[in-house]
Image: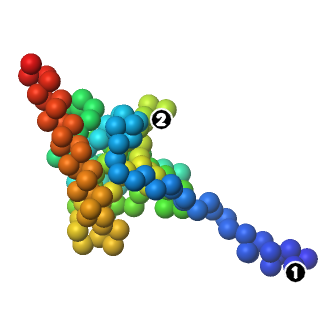
C-alpha cells in the first residue's frame, strides 16, 4: 500500500504543454488563423478551465472586426498550453474559432511584445510583424483598386 501511494505522487496530475516549433511564419500558418491582432491586455477573468483575456486592439492584421476590444479564451494553465498575460502587457495574438469562441494558446504564434519579458522573442516577433504588415499593405492596395 505504501508503494502505491509513493507511485501516485510520482505521476503528474496535469498534462505538460508540448508545442512543436512553428519556424518562420508562412502563408499556410497565416491562413490557419481567423483573427490576428496586436493589442494591450486590459482585463483578465480567471476560470476553472479557461481564462478570458480582454485586449484593447491597436491593429487588426487579419479578420474584419469593428470592435476596439476583443475577448479571447485560453486554457487556464500553462500546463494546458494557456497564455499567462499581465494587465498592461502588449501582445501579438493569433486566434482561431472553436465553439463560437475566439481562442488562443501557447502553441499558436501568440507572443508578448514587451522587450522586458523573459520569453520575449525579438527576432521572431520582428519577422511576424514584417510578414503581417506586408499582408496588410497588399490587402489595402487590393481593396483600393
Q: Element under label 2?
A: strand
Quarter the C terminus occupies = top left
In-image side of 78 versus 87 (left or right): right
Residue appearing at x 33%, y 73% in the figure: 118
Q: Confirm whether residue 47 shows in the render.
A: no
Q: Position of residue 104 (x, y in %)?
A: 41, 47
* Nearer the observer, 83 or 50: 83
Instruction: Give the answer, above or below, for where 57 lies relative to 144.
Output: below
Dots 1 and 2: beta carbons under 8 Å? no
Mark closer to the chain start, 1 or 2: 1
Farthest residue to the top: give it: 145
* Nearer the observer, 118 or 86: 118
Residue appearing at x 35%, y 68% in the figure: 119
Q: Element under label 1?
A: helix
Dot 2 surroundings within 10 Å: few (below 14), some, or many (20 or more)? few
Residue appearing at x 8%, y 22% in the figure: 144
Q: CA distance from mark 1 to mark 2?
A: 44 Å
Check disc 1 and report the residue beneath it. Answer: 2
Residue appearing at x 41%, y 57% in the figure: 83
* Nearer the observer, 44 or 126: 126
Q: Confirm whether residue 55 shows in the render.
A: yes
Q: Position of residue 130 (x, y in %)?
A: 20, 49
Q: Position of residue 31 (x, y in %)?
A: 36, 34
Q: Position of residue 140 (x, y in %)?
A: 13, 29
Dot 1 surroundings within 10 Å: few (below 14), some, or many (20 or more)? few
User: Which color scheme is applied?
Assistant: rainbow
Farthest residue to the left: give it: 144
In-image side of 10 versus 131 (left or right): right
Q: Nearer the viewer, mark 1 or mark 2?
A: 2
Check disc 2 and report the residue beneath it. Answer: 98
Instruction: Give the answer, above or below, for where 54 lies relative to 85.
Output: above
Name the image quarter holding residue 41.
bottom left
Amino acid at each position: 500500500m505504501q508503494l502505491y501511494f509513493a507511485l501516485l505522487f510520482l505521476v503528474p496530475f496535469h498534462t505538460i504543454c508540448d508545442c512543436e516549433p512553428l519556424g518562420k511564419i508562412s502563408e499556410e500558418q497565416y491562413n490557419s488563423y481567423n483573427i490576428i491582432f496586436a493589442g494591450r491586455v486590459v482585463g483578465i477573468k480567471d476560470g476553472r478551465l479557461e481564462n478570458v483575456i480582454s485586449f484593447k486592439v491597436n491593429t487588426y492584421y487579419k479578420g474584419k472586426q469593428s470592435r476596439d476590444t476583443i475577448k479571447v479564451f485560453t486554457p487556464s494553465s500553462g500546463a494546458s498550453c494557456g497564455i499567462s498575460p499581465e494587465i498592461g502587457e502588449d501582445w501579438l495574438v493569433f486566434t482561431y474559432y472553436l465553439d463560437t469562441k475566439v481562442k488562443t494558446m501557447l502553441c499558436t504564434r501568440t507572443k508578448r511584445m514587451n522587450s522586458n519579458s523573459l520569453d520575449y522573442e525579438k527576432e521572431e516577433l520582428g519577422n511576424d510583424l514584417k510578414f503581417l504588415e506586408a499582408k496588410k499593405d497588399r490587402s489595402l492596395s487590393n481593396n483600393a483598386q
